Image (cartoon, rainbow, N blue to C red):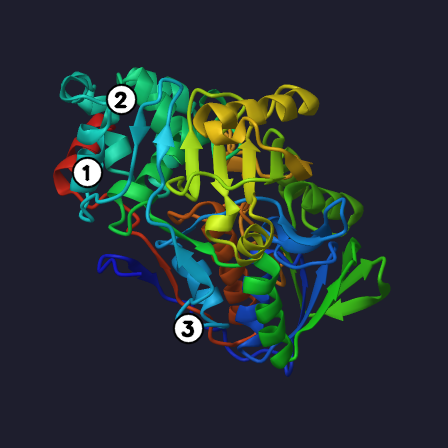
């Protein structure tokens, strides 16, 4: 968090004192969004209950303990997550449990390799935009100076001069692949760089909004000097992040209920949250911080919530394609120069390889004890059958890391999920926002619209804080400031060029 141009968004001023003495809020969902909302509310003296359907906290960044076939306990989660330096609001949440963020470990590089062995790296780039992106392009083996000359600068201007939310008016109707072709972006660089970003949204470039792609480029390159080097959790997510945050919230009086599914939310003078965990909880406010399908199910079963137009927005939300995570415990170590994380392009179905024993405490302990290694293979936007994908992933790994070709797999765990939000062309306008037709009801999550330059885990955290602020304002309480990268491009000549493009 060193960028001097990061923007502070002040909390909304509280309303005049209302009829709330000690307001009570139920937060549905114990992922990043729900935990941020619960933190924001509880720190201002609001009584909070958190209901989470899983037995662990963290949502899609949750962690738990599993056992290999020999009975040895191992850490497990849904896969690698990068904690970028410009995730200001997520990091502020984690600072509640450690102001120095000692639970995070820096990853020195984020190499990308394509089908021809060409490799890009983010190490050593200048920090100042736009020179960081220019240096990356000019030293890339897939992008040459002649490619820069051939770019359609006028058509490409929005990519370099993003303004949020205006970029969605300009580009949300176009898919990312068409946009990159229209600006003459070289095909090898498309595959190696932008396809990696696209698939981090669990979408092929043809199914991703060009506005989302441009916003990502702004967040990670031209809008921020924090760069693309990131941190990772130094231990499994449950022990490093969420159990300490659970303890912090409980010290504020928050009651956390896991293994509880909400079935219905009723509203009259107050809210009544029904679940399979006992009697309904009465509340002055509710935050729905679930995944897309969970939100749709709750709204569908809650006839008194919202109006027809709002309910249609919820029903129109979509989920992205499935993804597969294959975690392997191998009987031998990987070569010591292997990166902790490697992104791939043009090597379907493999999208990245993580070497967990390079950074995760539990995997490193297992590696030292056995002499083996723990690797994780990701396949995003899966369209083939899961069995076919699982057969091909280790083959692709062996192409990149030949020492794994003869390794014996002593343990394997596979996850296949389809619960990430869709960001297809045209989705933005009808995506539901944090505010709802009910003053006491708020939405949060990475699938919820917020007109700020945030994405992925940071979007979840930002909407969670925003949901808390919405309710705090109603209760007459002071909210929490938010921070983001600048909401428009930092380079004035590129902004002027973009404005002429759409004049």
5 above or below 430?
below
173 and 215: which is toward the camera: 215
- Which quadrant, please, contains the C terminus? top left
- Tell me the distance, in whole angstroms, between the alpha carbons under discs 2 and 3: 40 Å
268 and 480: which is toward the camera: 480
Q: Residue at x 43, y 67 (%)?
A: 102
Q: Residue at x 19, y 18 (%)?
A: 147
Question: In this image, 25 relative to 365: left or right?
Answer: right
Q: Secondary structure at mark 1?
A: helix
Q: Which residue is mark 2?
A: 142
Q: Secondary structure at mark 3?
A: loop
Q: Residue at x 19, y 38 (%)?
A: 495
Q: Which residue is mark 3?
A: 99
Indicate the position of residue 397 as horizontal and vertical percent values: 51, 28
Which of discs 3 and 1 lies nearer the camera? The answer is 3
- The reply to whether residue 282 is in sight is yes
Indicate the position of residue 110 as horizontal and vertical percent values: 36, 41
Question: In this image, 249 relative to 6: left or right?
Answer: right
Marking on residue 495: 1
């Amino acid at each position: 968090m060193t960028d001097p141009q990061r923007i502070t968004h002040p909390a909304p001023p509280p309303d005049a004192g209302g009829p709330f003495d000690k307001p009570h809020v139920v937060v549905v969902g114990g992922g990043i969004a729900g935990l941020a909302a619960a933190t924001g509310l509880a720190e201002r003296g609001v009584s909070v209950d958190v209901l989470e359907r899983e037995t662990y906290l963290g949502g899609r960044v949750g962690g738990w303990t599993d056992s290999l076939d020999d009975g040895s306990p191992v850490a497990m989660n849904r896969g690698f997550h990068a904690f970028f330096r410009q995730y200001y609001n997520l990091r502020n949440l984690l600072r509640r449990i450690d102001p120095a963020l000692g639970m995070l470990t820096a990853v020195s590089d984020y190499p990308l390799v394509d089908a021809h062995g060409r490799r890009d790296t983010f190490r050593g780039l200048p920090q100042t935009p736009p020179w960081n992106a220019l240096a990356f392009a000019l030293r890339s083996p897939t992008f040459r100076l002649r490619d820069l000359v051939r770019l359609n600068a006028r058509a490409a201007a929005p990519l370099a001069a993003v303004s949020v939310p205006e970029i969605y008016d300009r580009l949300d109707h176009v898919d990312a692949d068409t946009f990159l072709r229209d600006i003459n972006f070289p095909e090898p660089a498309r595959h190696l760089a932008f396809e990696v970003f696209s698939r981090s949204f669990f979408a092929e470039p043809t199914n991703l909004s060009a506005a989302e792609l441009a916003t990502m480029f702004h967040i990670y390159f031209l809008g921020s000097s924090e760069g693309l080097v990131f941190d990772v959790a130094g231990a499994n997510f449950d022990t490093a992040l969420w159990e300490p945050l659970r303890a912090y919230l409980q010290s504020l009086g928050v009651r956390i209920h896991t293994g509880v599914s909400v079935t219905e939310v009723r509203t009259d003078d107050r809210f009544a949250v029904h679940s399979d965990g006992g009697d309904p909880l009465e509340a002055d406010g509710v935050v729905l911080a679930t995944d897309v399908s969970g939100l749709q199910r709750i709204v569908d079963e809650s006839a008194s919530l919202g109006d027809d137009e709002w309910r249609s927005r919820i029903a129109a939300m979509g989920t992205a394609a499935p993804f597969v995570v294959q975690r392997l415990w191998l009987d031998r170590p990987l070569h010591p120069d292997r990166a902790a994380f490697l992104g791939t392009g043009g090597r379907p179905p493999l999208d990245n390889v993580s070497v967990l024993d390079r950074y995760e405490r539990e995997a490193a302990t297992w590696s030292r004890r056995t002499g083996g290694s723990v690797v994780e293979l990701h396949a995003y936007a899966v369209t083939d059958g899961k069995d076919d994908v699982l057969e091909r992933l280790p083959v692709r790994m062996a192409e990149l890391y030949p020492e794994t070709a003869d390794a014996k797999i002593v343990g394997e765990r596979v996850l296949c999920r389809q619960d990430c939000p869709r960001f297809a062309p045209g989705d933005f306008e009808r995506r539901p926002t944090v505010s709802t037709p009910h003053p006491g009801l708020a939405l949060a999550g990475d699938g919820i619209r917020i007109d700020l330059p945030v994405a992925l885990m940071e979007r979840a955290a930002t909407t969670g804080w925003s949901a808390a602020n919405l309710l705090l304002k109603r209760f007459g309480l002071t909210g929490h400031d938010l921070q983001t990268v600048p909401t428009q491009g930092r380079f004035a000549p590129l902004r002027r060029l973009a404005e002429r493009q759409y004049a």
